[in-house]
Amino acid sequence: GSRAGEAGLGKDPLVFAHRGSSAVLPEHTLAAYLRALDEGADGLECDVRLTRDGHLVCVHDRRLDRTSNGRGRVSARTLAELNELDFGSWHPGASSEDAPTDVPADPSRTRLLTLDRLLRAVREAGRPVELLIETKHPTRYGGDVERRLTTLLREHGLLEPRPSDPVRVTVMSFSALAVRRMRVLAPRLSTVLLLEVIPPGLRVGRLPFGAKIAGPGIGLVRARPQLIPALRAAGHQVYVWTVNETNDLDLLLDHGVDGIITDRPALILERLGR
Ligand code: G3P
Ligand code: CA
C-alpha cells in the first residue's frame, strides 16, 4: 500500500515518464520510452513540433542545439535532414535540464523519434498506456500542429478511442488556445491545460475551454498545495509535472493527486510500492 491508499484518498496516481525515462537515457529517444515502459510507467509524456515539411517529431526545444549534434531550429529542417542527426549528443550547458546518465554507444538508438513511430511503439507494448502529447508553439504555426496531430491520431485509430483500446491519448498545452483547438478537432480526447502560474482571472473551478485535466507545475503546487483539492473538488483531475524528488511526491500524495509526470519513473514507482 502507498501513502495515498493509506490516507484513503483513492487510487494511486498514474505515473507518466516525462520525455521517456529521461534521467537515464537521452530524452525523447525511443530507447528512453521503451525503458519507461519496462520500468512499469502507466504512461508517457512527449513534446511535439513540426518539421519544415510538416512531420510531427518528438523534440522539446525550439532549437536542436541542446539535445543533438545539430544546430538551429527544428522547424527549419526537413524530416530527412533531422534523420541524419544524433540525439545522444548531449549539451547540458544549454539549459537547466540534467544530462542523462546513460547515453547508448550505438547511434541507431539515439535517432530522431517521430510521433508516428512513438504511436506504433505504444501500440506494440500490448498493454495499457496513456500517452500525453504536448503541442509546442501553437501560435507560431497557426494551428498546423493540432491539425496534423488530429490527422495522425486518426490514422492510428486513436482519435475516437474505444473503451476496450488499451492505448489512450491525452493532449496537453500551456496554451488555452491550443486546448480549445483540440477540443474542436478531437472532442473525444481528454485535454490538459498546463499551468506554470495561475493566470490572472482564472477561476480554479473553471479551466478554460473545457480542459478536463489541470497540469500545474510542481513549483506552483509547492507554493499553493491547496490548489490540488480545489481543482479536484471542481471536478478536474490533476496531473503534476515534473516530480523527481520523493519529498515532492509525499506532498502530492497528501493532497490526492491523479497523475505524476516524472523524469524518474522507476524511483517514483518504487516509492509508491509498485
Ligand atoms: O508535462 C508538462 C511539462 O512537460 C511541461 O514543461 O518544459 O518540460 O515541456 P516542459
Ligand atoms: Ca512537455
Image (cartoon, grey):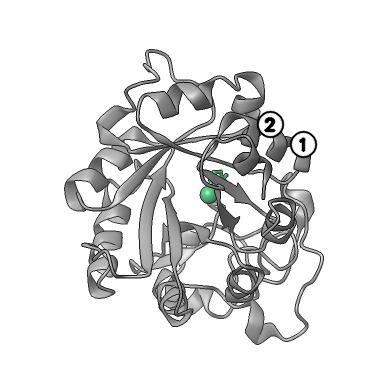
**Looking at this view, is 75 or 182 the one in front?**
182
Q: In this orientation, which residue lies closer to the viewer: 89 or 267?
A: 267
Q: Quadrant of the C terminus?
A: bottom right
**Is 97 situated above or below 203?**
below
How many badges with numbers are in the image? 2
**Residues packed near mark 2 inside 10 Å, few (<14), some (14 to 19) or many (20 plus):** some
Disc 1 is placed on an element classified as helix
Q: Is residue 17 left or right of residue 93?
A: left
* Percent x, y of residue 129: 46, 66
Q: Callout 2, which amino acid? A: Leu
Q: CA distance from mark 1 to mark 2?
A: 6 Å
What label sits on residue 251 in the rendered view? 2
Amino acid bearing label 1: Asn
Q: Is residue 185 visible?
A: yes
Within 10 angstroms of label 1, few (less than 14), some, or many (20 or more) residues? few
**What residue is disc 1 on?**
247
Determine if residue 66 is in view.
no
Taking the spot 50% from the left edge, 58% from the top edge, the residue there is 46
Q: What percent of the width, then of the height, locates residue 200?
A: 42, 14
Discs 1, 2 touching: Cβ within 8 Å: yes
- Residue 250's place in the image compared with 113, above or below, is above
Spot occupied by residue 132 in the image (x, y as percentages of width and height): 44, 55
Give how far across and how far down residue 11 sits, in percent: 52, 46
* Vertical side of 231 occupied by 103: above or below: below
Residue 114 picture quarter: bottom left
